[in-house]
Amino acid sequence: MAPPANRRSGYSRRAQYTIFISYFAGVAGVLLGVVLLVVSFVQPSAFTGLRVLAADLTEPAGHVTATGRMASKDFFATVSGYFKAGSQHARLERELAIAKIRLVEARATAVENRRLKGLLGLAQQSPAPVVVTRLTSSTAASTRRYATLAAGVDRGVQKGMPVRSEMGLLGRVLEVGQGSARVLLVTDSESVVPVRRASDGVPAFAQGTGDGTLRIRLINLGLNPLKKGDVLVTSGSGGLYRPGTPIAIVANILRDGATAQVIANPSDSDYVLVDRPFAPVPPPAITPIPDSQ
C-alpha cells in the first residue's frame, strides 16, 4: 500500500531538525541584531574597523563602477557634441559673416571720415570757397563730359568758377541756373587746363579726350622729360585755376607728351567746392627813371 501524500513532519526527524534549526537561526539573528543595535547606540566607534574593512573590500568594485560611469558619460557627451557640431558651426559662420560686414562698414566709415575731413580742411582755407555743395550727377558714357551741381545763382555760383573736390580739380562752371549749375569736366574734349609737373614745374597743357583721360601736350618740344607716375598740378597760367591743384597722374608716355589719368573722379565725389576764379598778381608798375640833366 502507498504512503499517504500529506505526511506530517513528525514522521521525519530530518524535517523536524530543519524546522528547529530555521527557528533557532531566526531567533538568534533577531537577538544578534538587537545586540548590535544596542552596541551601535552605546559605542558607535566599535564598528569602525569593520566599516573600514568593508570599504577596502568594496573599493575595487566601486572604482570599476565609477570608471564605467565616467566612460558612459563621456560617450554620451561625445555623441551629443557630434549632433550639436553642425548647428554650432552654422552659428559661428553667421557670426563670422556679420563680423566681416561690420569690419567693412568700419573701414568705409573711416574712409568717409578722412574724405569729409579733407573737404573741411579745404573749406577752411583762405580764400574761402564760394560754396560747398553736392555733385548730383555726371556723364560717364559720352564724348561730352558734364556734371551738375546742387547750387546756382541763389548760392553765389557764377559762370567760369573752378570746381574741385578734396582730391583735385574737376572742371569749371559752364552754365548757371537759379538752383543748379552745369560743370564742364576736365575730361571733356573742349577743356584745356594749363598744368606743370609738380616735381620741377615742366609746363604743359592738359586737354580732355572725352574718354575719361587727359592728353598732356608739352609746351617746349624736344626731349620728353615726363615719366610714368608723374603728378601734374595746375600752373595758374592765364588765371581761372588756382596754381598747385592736383589734376592728373601720367599713365603712358608719348613722343610729344603723355596720356594721364585724372585724380578727382566725379563718380567718387559726393561734395565739391566752388572756388572764385584765380587772378594772378599783376607785376609791379615800372617807374620811369627821370633823365639826368
Image (cartoon, rainbow, N blue to C red):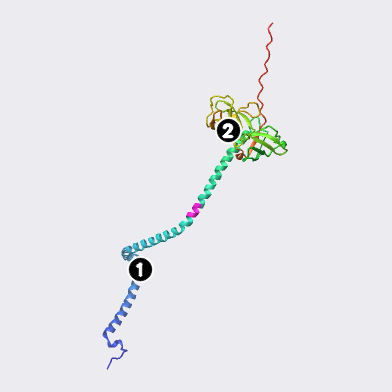
- Pointer 1 local density, CA inside 10 Å: few below 14, some 14–19, many at least 20: few
Numbered badge on residue 2: none
Residue 55 appears in view: no
The residue shown at (32%, 73%) is: 32
Bounds of the magenta span? 89-93
Number of numbered discs visible in the structure rendering = 2
Query: Where does label 2 land, which residue?
Result: 248
Disc 2 element: strand
Q: Given the image, on which type of amino acid does mark 2 rest?
A: Ala
Query: In the displayed structure, would residue 16 be above or below residue 204?
Result: below
Disc 1 element: helix
Residue 75 screen position, x and y as percent: 40, 60
Q: CA distance from mark 2 to mark 1?
A: 105 Å
Residue 118 screen position, x and y as percent: 60, 35
Left or right, residue 43 beside residue 159: left
Query: Where does label 1 land, which residue?
Result: 40
Q: Are marks 2 and 1 in contact (CB under 8 Å)?
A: no
Quarter holding the N terminus is: bottom left
Residue 201 screen position, x and y as percent: 57, 25
